[in-house]
Amino acid sequence: MLDLSKYTKELIKHFSSSGNILLVCHINPDGDAIGAQLALYQYLKAQGKSVEMIAPNNLQDFLKWMDGADLINIYIRQRDKCKKLIADAGLIVMLDFNQTSRLGEAEELINSSSALKIIIDHHLEPADFNGLMISDPSKCSTSELVHELITLMNDGPFISKPYAEALYVGIITDTGNFEYGNYTSRTFRIVADLLETGIAKERILNLIYNNFSEERMRLMGFSLNERMVLIPEYQTAYIFLTRNDLAAFKYTKGDTEGFVNMPLSISRIIFSTLFIEKEGFIKISFRSKGKFPVNLFASEYFSGGGHLNASGGEYPDTLKNTVGYFKKILKENFKRFNQIG
Ligand code: 5GP
Ligand code: MN
């Protein structure tokens, strides 16, 4: 585990000496990316800092209700404003990713900015980075890491309801509502503190988990019934969805969230993959149980990365060819990956 206290002084110095702090999360932001971003925003605003936020692309509906979410500037929708925010920033803090390719269209401008840069993240295998990298893969979420850093800087817990709600969202979404096993006793102590601030946990749980459309539910049924394939000899299952499938169920962003986890509840299945046909490429999500390292599977063969048990990537080909390539890679490498664990 990383000794976070060694960053306290440096962080206090950077946050207090920088004008215009810019907080940036990754493309297709999840609950943890937005939770960590909004929590840090709340803290820095309470310190009287000038803070702005950018997300590379749109937030999913299940996160839009969050306090401060409407203040996040969406790069692909507000390019001119975002370019100016980047140009004016004295300090850029990047949250919940460790490769600048996850900045989408904003990558080039942020990379070439002369502002001081900090990454706060919990993914494995950070890429080389020209700035301060605070990377702790032992944390269940970037939100948990942000909270620990803020508690150190603040010399005690920072208490505010929007802050606690943001952290709670980050922690429950990145632990699959405490299902994935990436949490620790420390996570529960933090969550206990968050609940004591009086956050509306039932409301939050309903907004996140019980807020889907009928079409999404039916698409889930269709995916399991018609589009799930098992490869028992490699303890693997995959689901594939074509653009036509998605259109038939009136797909909106976020509808396939969580589908990739479902095959893992089949006994003996330890590796699950979801292929989604996009325009000109295939977006892929990987999940595993135990020690099968899907981050390596994604980074070695699908230009991606992530965590030991949850990763993603993409492949620039048709759905048919991508699935064919996947099966070939799986056959050639299953044993090797299974032995790494
Ligand atoms: P998801 O399958 O939910 O999109 O992503 C699971 C995990 O893999 C997330 O932690 C995310 O950061 C990582 N991930 C997903 N897609 C990519 C990708 O294209 N590149 C990299 N480096 N990581 C990804
Ligand atoms: Mn995360």
Image (cartoon, rainbow, N blue to C red):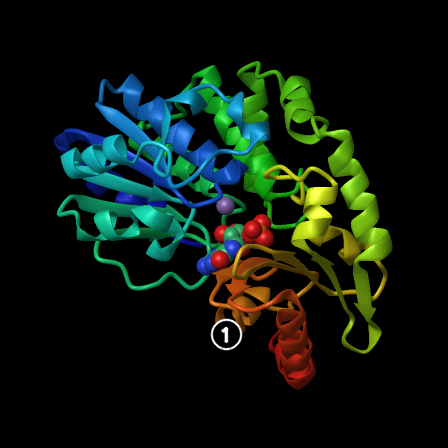
Q: For the residue marked with disc 1, what is the amino acid?
A: Glu
In the image shown, does 214 or 258 lie closer to the viewer? 214
Image point (62%, 22%), residue name: 204
In the image shown, does 48 or 67 lie closer to the viewer? 67
Question: Does 245 sit left or right of 198 as displayed?
Answer: right
Q: Residue 41 at x, y = what percent?
A: 34, 27
Q: Residue 206 at x, y = what percent?
A: 69, 23
**What residue sits right under mark 1 in the picture?**
300
Please identify the quadrant where the N terminus is shown.
bottom left
Local SS, label 1:
helix
Question: Does 249 sit left or right of 119 as displayed?
Answer: right
In the image shown, does 325 or 118 lie closer to the viewer? 325
Question: Does 66 sit left or right of 192 as displayed?
Answer: left
Q: Is residue 190 visible?
A: no
Where, by quadrant of the figure, is residue 22 drawn? top left
Image point (25%, 20%), residue name: 47
Task: Tell how many labels.
Answer: 1
Q: Residue 130 at x, y = what percent?
A: 21, 57
Question: Given the current orientation, which residue lies at the most extreme bottom position?
Answer: 332
Q: Residue 159 at x, y = what percent?
A: 42, 18
Question: Does 274 sit left or right of 193 as displayed?
Answer: right
Where, by quadrant of the figure, is residue 160 drawn? top left
Query: Where 19 sits versus 226, above or below?
Result: above
Q: Is residue 131 visible?
A: yes
Please identify the quadrant where the C terminus is shown.
bottom right
Image point (48%, 16%), residue name: 161
Q: Residues within 10 Å of mark 1 (few under 14, many from 20)?
A: few
Image point (53%, 20%), residue name: 65
